[in-house]
Amino acid sequence: MDAPAVILDRPQLAENIGSAARIMANFGLTDLRLVSPRDGWPQERAWATASGANWPLDGARVFDTVADAIADLKVVLATTARPRETNLPVETPRQASARLRAAIADGLACGLLFGAERAGLETQDIALCQGIVTIPIDPKFHSLNLAQAVAINGYEWWTGRADAPPDKFREGPPPADQASMMGLYGHLEDELEAAGFFFPPENKPSMVRNLRVALGRAGFTDQEVRTLRGVVTALSKGRGKVLERLARKKADPSG
Amino acid sequence: MDAPAVILDRPQLAENIGSAARIMANFGLTDLRLVSPRDGWPQERAWATASGANWPLDGARVFDTVADAIADLKVVLATTARPRETNLPVETPRQASARLRAAIADGLACGLLFGAERAGLETQDIALCQGIVTIPIDPKFHSLNLAQAVAINGYEWWTGRADAPPDKFREGPPPADQASMMGLYGHLEDELEAAGFFFPPENKPSMVRNLRVALGRAGFTDQEVRTLRGVVTALSKGRGKVLERLARKKADPSG
């Protein structure tokens, strides 16, 4: 066993079981256990909601009681916002995932226990666990969907797995060197000078500086510098060409 | 504004909008924006799914395009697992939430953009954003439910709140809003079109996208946007004027 089991206590809606299975698959969790699902098991709507994440549902086991469902597990954490009088340690999902990883690295079978949609977990079942996980949420609205609770804990489990930052796709090519940037600046400023942009002339140094600061912040790549030089050329020469063509046309309407 | 807006692009199922609203309420998010919801708006099933988290739904605003929906925002991050060819920085939800907190501490209105259930986000809309958020999930099953994607980002936003805001000033005025940037892009692209820059024509969409991504990275201020619009005008019209003047001079050398 290389990931914690997910135990749903008396889940009411098949859709929530399916949504839980789907998010389990997103985060590398496969062992789903159901304690007395209200509408029996299996239920088609669970598969319909899982969007193809069938394996946690296909392999799901059903138990009569929480005690039965967790009998083979060594470390079970109860997800609840109501610790009641159990006096168990209360952890965030992030702390809990570190604890579960450590336990699994030690060869201990682990589980995350979730209560029913409205009723939550009973104190007697929480008391069978080794700790409590409480998802920090806004006290102004703490009605958390069951599958969302599985999601947050699954996400912390998955992202904590490597404890290394997740792979990035790519950082993209590096920024162009200063010589290329100076080439762009010079090109742009020459064309702006020719176009009469720097007016009054005594403001040219600050206008040049402001343009360079603004463009420099983008960290353009070499390719982007080439594109922008094409832009400058097109804007400065292209319009002229259009005007020339118009002028020629006027001079010789038959052309 | 003390939390990022949540923008859902072309959401298909009212249930997903309701689930998103519910998890938004769990994590202190209130500003919900819908871009062309498939089945129209409002829809009763959204409220039924929200389990009492009515306020994001009651206040939800509907827009025709992503550009309209984010027009007033300064920092918008696109949630997608497919960065495509945009060359934007890719961050985890945790990194993104730190970036959003820093921006909001600086008084900048922020948003998180989510794509449609199956189609995801279009590259042209990603190109309007300042970064990409990718939720690390198991590559073996990456079909992530829309509301679950909102949940993971909302959770990171909420749990990161406690972190002290980073110790940094932003030098100078804030970045221009998206509406100003769209104005600049439109102006530049019109002039480039007139100048025959987009060649061959079938490459225009990718050329436009590359330009927007490169320029968008700079985080131009309002003043800089005005300056750059002056640059575009000067380059496109100024050269024409110079040519006209030369032409006049040639026609009447005494002028």
Image: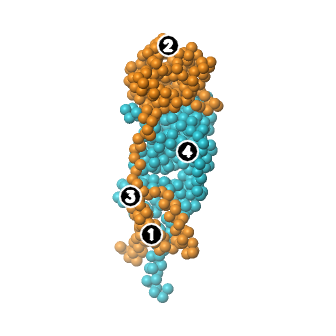
Chain colours: A orange, B cyan
First-in-chain label (1 vs 3): 1
What residue type is disc 3 on?
A: Gln
What residue type is disc 4 on?
A: Leu
Closest to the observer, B141 or A137: A137
Residue B191 seen in this snapshot: yes
| Above-or-below relation of A93 to B239 | above
Query: Could you tell me residue A182's position as x and y percent?
Result: 44, 66
Left or right relative to B108: residue B209: left
Q: Label 2 belongs to which residue?
A: A67
Pick out the residue farthest to the right. Answer: A140
* Callout 3 touching callout 4 (CB < 8 Å): no
Q: Are marks 1 and 4 on the same chain?
A: no
Left or right relative to A221: residue B112: right
Answer few, some or many: residues within 10 Å of disc 3's Cα (few below 14, many 20 plus, some between 14 and 19). Answer: few
The residues bearing labels 1 and 2 have C-alpha atoms spaced at a distance of 76 Å
Left or right relative to B35: residue B52: right
The label nearer to you, 2 versus 4, is 2
Quarter occupied by the N terminus of chain B: top right
Query: Could you tell me residue B243's position as x and y percent?
Result: 45, 76
Q: Chain of mark 2?
A: A
Q: Chain of mark 3?
A: A
Q: Are marks 3 and 4 on the same chain?
A: no
Q: What is the count of numbered marks? A: 4
At mark 3, the secondary structure is: helix
Q: Label 3 belongs to which residue?
A: A223
Q: Label 4 belongs to which residue?
A: B100
Q: At x 41% / y 59%, what residue is drawn?
A: A176
The residues bearing labels 1 and 4 have C-alpha atoms spaced at a distance of 36 Å
What residue type is disc 1 on?
A: Gly
